[in-house]
Amino acid sequence: MTTGNFEKRILCIGAGYVGGPTMAMIAAKCPQYEVTIVDINEARIKAWQTDNLPIYEPGLLEVVKQARNKNLFFSTDIDNNIKKADIIFVSVNTPTKTYGEGEGKAADLQFWEKTARNILKVSESDKIIVEKSTLPVRTAHAMERILDANANGLKFEVISNPEFLAEGSAIQDMENPDRILIGSHETESGLKARQAIVDIYANWVPRERIITSNLWSAELSKLVANAFLAQRISSINSISALCEVTEANVAEVARAIGTDSRIGPKFLNASVGFGGSCFKKDILNLVYICEHYGLHEVARYWESVVSMNEYQEQRFVTNMIKVMFNTVAEKRIALFGFAFKANTGDTRESPAIHVTKNLIAECAQVAITDPKALDNAKLDLKDIAGNIEFTENVYEAAQGAHAIAILTEWDEYKTLDYEKIFQSMEKPAFIFDGRNILDHDRLYKIGFNVFTIGAPPRKHF
Ligand code: NAD
Ligand code: UGA
């Protein structure tokens, strides 16, 4: 391929939470490569070309600006860019299927397959195709069957390079990853293509952190990593329920077990539940794959991680209603945070959606505040008829409220003037800390009735 002044042309199809940040990082770290990101979503592509990026991620704008219009480009011209590319990362969405066979569990691969067919249709030269999206194990096999159906003798080598970044810390995660995983066929051409992808990351990632494996291990490892992470949260959340009735404190239990180096301290924060676009989707996908292979016990085991999360979300909102004298009708309730975690505007599968819907069903008046996620919150709740108010001002949200629920662990919620907030609320005033981030003793002394995850409540009545 001709590559102009650049050593290689890299294309990424899909300019979302993964495609945008990962390719911006590659472009910033590898000025010798030309990196282009394409998407069918014109508005998204336009936004990537401005300083008002389509996603909020700390530090992302700086990385984008470092490379944009030098060796990083955004475009909606998918076909021409496929033609020019040497390496194509595919980072389209792979949501849970909402129809047909596997509905509610299997991954919907329609966007994926469309890109494969398009690559096949317009390509005029050999290419390396990199699975960046999270996919069911053995998807590369299906992809190869589509790509090998070309009549002009082109060779497409499929590589799996799943992404492990977490939203809110994507830049750090990519700058200094625990590992990069690259899977390929262990044939001569497979190993050559694998090396081409290793060479990209080796520009900034120490070689010992670049793990290589066969294709199927790489595909499956991504689903398993998310399943294990989510399992830890469901495990500690299950124990939080037991703590609440036994006067144990889940934070103390987490600390006690987390100091065992075999268990480790991370990912043991009990919460209102895990959200995000991937944990539930990827576990359900794993469950579906196990069922497909007749491994029903394995499927049930992983499915329980998702049911425990649903239990935790429901338990939180049921408890709110119960302790507020079994009715929230006409009561103003302030939700602090709507994003599924701090430092992102993403609200996909956020527990806040579930909590809001339940409160509205109980005829509460809900005031939602969040520093970054209000636009997405409005979209999530657009079909819900009820009394919902959105404000960036936390004090305004709490004004006249009977209760506050902390649903996202934004740092700024830790240092608010809770005396002022207490004065402005109806009494008795309740606070439900769904993220265990506040100083509960202090809140109790101010006069709040404090309910936390995994510890007995502090009540004035
Ligand atoms: P996203 O929805 O933010 O982005 C996907 C993009 O692909 C969208 O902009 C969509 O318009 C585009 N697209 C769909 N079909 C297309 C086509 N035929 N041609 C061109 N563009 C097309 O999704 P995301 O969060 O970036 O996730 C992408 C993949 O990465 C998923 O498989 C997900 O599981 C995985 N993943 C996500 C994260 C995360 O933090 N969000 C982390 C690791 C892995
Ligand atoms: C997660 C994984 O951490 C990434 O490695 C993976 O690449 C990504 O999914 C993906 O495949 O999409 P993400 O969902 O962005 O990343 O964020 P996490 O930090 O994992 O948090 C997920 C959810 O768990 C959030 O709602 C968070 O608040 C919750 N959580 C996390 C807890 O409730 N307790 C914890 O101790 C940690």
Image (cartoon, rainbow, N blue to C red):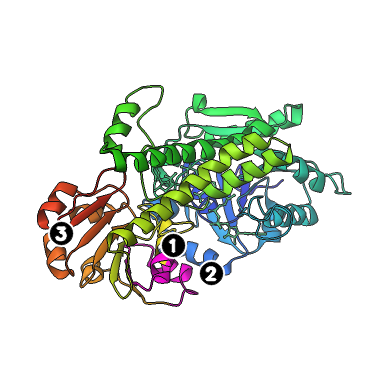
* Numbered disc 2: secondary structure: helix
> Which SS class for mark 3?
helix
Which quadrant is the C terminus positioned in? bottom left
Q: Which mark is residue 418?
A: 3
Could you classify mark 1 by the number of other residues whose Cα lies within 10 Å: few (under 14), some (14-19), or many (20 or more)?
many
Q: Does dot 1 land on a helix, a strand or a loop? A: helix
Q: Which residue is mark 2?
A: 43
Q: Mark 2 near ligand 1 (CB under 8 Å)?
A: no
Residue type of the residue flagged with mark 3: Tyr
Tell which of 107 and 398 is nearer to you: 398
Please rate how many residues cluster around mark 3, counting C-alpha atoms within 10 Å: few if below 14, some from 14 to 19, many from 20: some
Q: Is residue 197 magenta?
A: no
* Of marks 1 and 2, the one in the foreground: 1
Residue 372 in magenta stretch: yes
Amino acid under disc 1: Ile
Give whichever of discs 1 and 3 has the lower sequence position: 1
- The label nearer to you, 3 versus 2, is 3
Which span of residues is magenta-colored?
Answer: 357-385
